[in-house]
Each structure stands twice: as C-alpha cells, then as structure tokens.
Amino acid sequence: MQLKFIIVTLVIHHASADYFRTQPDFVKTCLKSDPEFDDCSRDAVQKLFDALGPGLPEIGMPPLDPLNIPKIRILQGEGPVNVNAALDNVTVTGFGKTEVLMSQVDSKTYDFYTKVRVPKIRIEGTYDLKGKILVIPLVGRGKCWFEPSNMTIDIVSDIKLYEKDGFVFFNVTAAHVKYSIGGLKLRMNNLFDGIQSLEESTNAYLNENWRPVSESLRPILSKTIEDILLGFTQTLFHNLPANFLIGDVKNKNKKLEDAF
Ligand SMILES: *[C@@H]1O[C@H](CO)[C@@H](O)[C@H](O)[C@H]1NC(C)=O
Ligand SMILES: *[C@@H]1O[C@H](CO)[C@@H](O)[C@H](O)[C@H]1NC(C)=O
Ligand SMILES: *[C@@H]1O[C@H](CO)[C@@H](O)[C@H](O)[C@H]1NC(C)=O
C-alpha cells in the first residue's frame, strides 16, 4: 500500500504541574535485580493503567477513559484507502479496561516492552469524509462510531534517562505500536448525504468486510494509538521519579558524562 500522506492532529494537554516527590500508592516498586522482575513489572504497569483510567488531576493528566480528542485529520492518498477525512469531537471509551499481559524492561537502555489487551474500544465522533475505502467511493458527514474488539497491542517505548533535582526520570522519546483485533463493527450515519438505501447497504458491506476495512485503517490507527500513548506516558514519566518504579535504576549515561 502506498501512502502519500497521513496527518494526525491530537491535542493532549501536557502538564506543567509539579512532580511527585513522595511515592503515590498507585506506584509499585520493582527491582531489576529481582529474578521475578517481569512479573512484578506487569503488576506495576497494570496499576499505572488502572490509575490513568480516571485521570491524575494532581499532575494535570486528563482521564484515559473516556478519552476526548478534539480533532483527528486523515489525509491519505493512493492504495485501498484514499480519503480526505476529519473526525471531530472524538470520544474513545474502553482503555480503562486495559489488561497488561506482559512487561519487560531492557537492562541496558531501559526501553519498555509492553503487551496489553483491550477487550472493547468504542470510538465516537463526527466525521466528514470524501474518498474511497476498498472499492467504494464514500462521501458524507455525520455521526459515526467504530468498535474494535479484543485488541492486543505490542508497544515498544524508547527511553532516555535524565536527572532533575537529583532524581532520575524516564524520558519517553518514541512509542512503536503493533496491534491485532478480533473484530470491528462500525456505523457511519448520513453517508451520501442521507440517501437511505445507499447508506444502509454501504454500512452493511463495510461491516461484512471488516477485515480488509480494518487493514486499510491500520496506518492511521497505529499512528493515533502511538500519539495517544506517547502523550500519556511522557506526561506521566516526566512527573514520576524513575526509582519509584525501578528501585535500583542506574543512570549509566550520567556516569559516562561524569567520567569525561
Ligand atoms: C464539537 O463540539 C463543540 C462543543 O461541544 C461544538 O461547538 C462543535 O460544533 C462540535 N463540532 C462538530 C464538528 O460537531
Ligand atoms: C483475543 O486475541 C488473542 C490474540 O489474538 C487470542 O489469543 C484470544 O483468544 C482472543 N480472545 C477473545 C476473547 O477473543
Ligand atoms: C527528551 O527527549 C527529547 C528527544 O530526544 C528531547 O528533545 C528532550 O529535551 C528530552 N527531555 C528531557 C527533559 O530530557
């Protein structure tokens, strides 16, 4: 598939609030030297997701569930998806039920490897669309929803360590996401400006062909999930000293810098 252009605009309000100086009770400390580190860290990351669900107002973090995104723009040319679309006033529900399946941390770089499962996600908003999905030309604007089920997501988070006031912090510099879903239901109201018979048959066709439809949405959905995760993890970890999570964290870069 050839992509000319994808633009996603997400506005996540970044916190400028003060960081946690004492360990909050949603943070569980694990030791990298512990042979059971991976199990401990899976529980610790689960507790983080559980806390992010309702939000952390003390560090200015909005809820992850429901998640409000003012606008997602999609501009994508060529291939099976050829669309110029905008989603406005988007509400995403379901990430509060995220189940952490695996968590590993690289001993050298501290990069995070995380695998999660989200049983059901619902994305609702107002769409404005002109383009082609599969072989169908689509045009319309109105309310829409998408429901991917049993989504499993593999996340690699690139980490750099830095120090502030003598505390070590994780700087999440990038997130890489690979996901799979077990199903997709969707509905776009007012397709073809409300020509009822076309609207019904097209929605039925898209639902019957959910696999190729979801494949064609993969680049935009991957990028959107990456942007959401990056926004949340960056804010969280800039506010949470690393040793609260990994008790024996070592800033190796610091030692190198000091040596020179
Ligand atoms: C989005 O919501 C805002 C505030 O509720 C409203 O003013 C605006 O018209 C909505 N935009 C669309 C495209 O529905
Ligand atoms: C969800 O997906 C995973 C991995 O694709 C699969 O192993 C599991 O059986 C699925 N669970 C449900 C409830 O469909
Ligand atoms: C985090 O990493 C980014 C990208 O490498 C860098 O621009 C930024 O200054 C870093 N932030 C801190 C606080 O170290």
Image: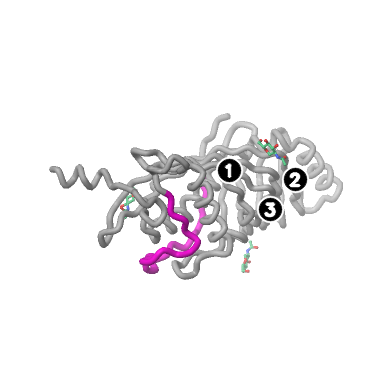
Crowding near pointer 1: few (<14 within 10 Å), some, many (20+)?
some
Q: Position of residue 68 (x, y in %)?
A: 59, 61
The quadrant in which the N terminus is found is: top right
Which residue corresponds to the image point at 83% horizontal and 42% vertical from the top-left? 201
Callout 2–callout 1 Cβ contact below 8 Å? no
Q: Position of residue 81 (x, y in %)?
A: 63, 36
- Along the horizontal axis of the image, is 254 left or right of 207? left
Q: Position of residue 200 (x, y in %)?
A: 83, 46
To which residue does mark 1 refer? Answer: 101
- Looking at the picture, tell me which residue is in the foreground, 161 or 88: 161
Quarter holding ligand 1 = bottom right
Q: Which of pointers 2 and 3 lies earlier in the amino acid sequence?
A: 3
- Looking at the picture, tell me which residue is in the foreground, 39 or 200: 39
Give the residues drawn in magenta, as a range.
7-30
Snapshot colouring: one colour
To which residue does mark 3 refer? Answer: 122
The quadrant in which the C terminus is found is: top left
Q: Amino acid at mark 2?
A: Lys
Element class at badge 2: strand
- Looking at the picture, tell me which residue is in the foreground, 106 or 84: 106
- Along the horizontal axis of the image, is 60 left or right of 181? left
- Looking at the picture, tell me which residue is in the foreground, 244 or 83: 244
